[in-house]
Amino acid sequence: MTIHCLPYRARSIRALLTLLALLALAFLLLPFLALLTHTSFSSLAQTFNQGTGQAIETSVFSTLIAVVVIVSFGTPLGWLLSRRKSVFWRLIEFFLYIPLLMPPLVIGLLLVYFYGPYGWIGHFLENYQISATNSFLAIVIAEIYEAMPYFVFSAIAAFSQVDHRLEQTAMALGLTPFHTFRRVTLPLSFPGLTVGIAMAFARALGAFGAVIIVAYDPHTLPVQIWIALEEQGLPTALPIALILMFIALPLPLLAVFWRIIRGTTTK
């Protein structure tokens, strides 16, 4: 009796888990499908005519600058954290979770206090007629702060997957540490770094909480969505949200898809 009940119980558990998985998938994807089906091309054209083009330009250019800064400084940091195992570097990695987990609105308040007229850096920048609040620079700073942890942790994971023996072999053959990093470490970790870059791009482009505090103007796309929602309602905000998704999602999705395909072909 017990033997016959086991397959039935296993099938019941499997069916329950499948149902829960499908419900989770529907919960995540159905709102996106509803947005696609309830937004017309005419509303998108009307959105462009209402001045959203300037917000798109501000968002894209600020995000590209932020990503360049993030990759330039985050790559060495990710490499060091993946190689250094001392207590000091483990603490550094631990403290990186603070900006990752911190509410974006709190990030904005901290940035205003540190880079704005209340902080010594803000006073220093004012001497050169540079403002880190309500400016393009403020947007870039906020996007870097929100997006950099995503890239750094991706870089740590990517560099940790590189076999140290390959690096040691390269240096034993006469390559310098720099050339070993460029010719061995970087190519092997490139798929993971690509995903990190894509995630940082999407996170920076969609940054809202910190950006709206440090730089309400010039408007980025997320801020433009909020203004449209407050002033004109949901029908006006939805097309702008769809534009933001069309800009932000393709790069991360392609990066993840490429890594999945690459992983299946190399097995």
Image: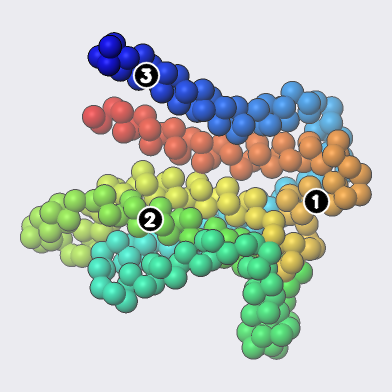
Answer yes or no: is residue 137 visible: no
**Residue in the picture at 24% in, 51% down:** 162
The residue to which callout 1 is attached is 226
Say which element carries label 1. helix
Answer yes or no: is residue 49 visible: yes
Residue most extreme to the front: 1
Question: Closer to the N terminus: mark 2 or mark 3?
Answer: 3
Say which element carries label 2. helix
Question: In the visual, does 248 lie left or right of 43?
Answer: left
Position in image of residue 6 (x %, y %): 30, 17
Question: Closer to the N terminus: mark 3 or mark 1?
Answer: 3
Contact check, label 2 and label 1, Cβ < 8 Å: no
Question: Closer to the N terminus: mark 2 or mark 1?
Answer: 2
Where is residue 238, by image quadrant?
A: top right
Question: In the visual, does 253 lie left or right of 187?
Answer: right
The residue to which callout 3 is attached is 9
The residue to which callout 2 is attached is 155
Position in image of residue 124 (x %, y %): 65, 87
The foreground one among 231 and 265 is 231
Say which element carries label 3. helix
Question: In the visual, does 56 lie left or right of 202?
Answer: right
Mark 2 or 3: in front is 3
| CA distance for labels 2 and 1 | 33 Å
122 over 241 or under it: above or below:
below
**Residue in the picture at 64% in, 88% down:** 120
| CA distance for labels 3 and 1 | 50 Å
**Screen quadrant of the C terminus:** top left
Density class for disc 3 (Cα within 10 Å; few <14, some 14-19, many ≥20) is: few
**Residue in the picture at 17% in, 55% down:** 164
Question: What amino acid is at disc 1?
Answer: Trp
Mark on residue 174?
none
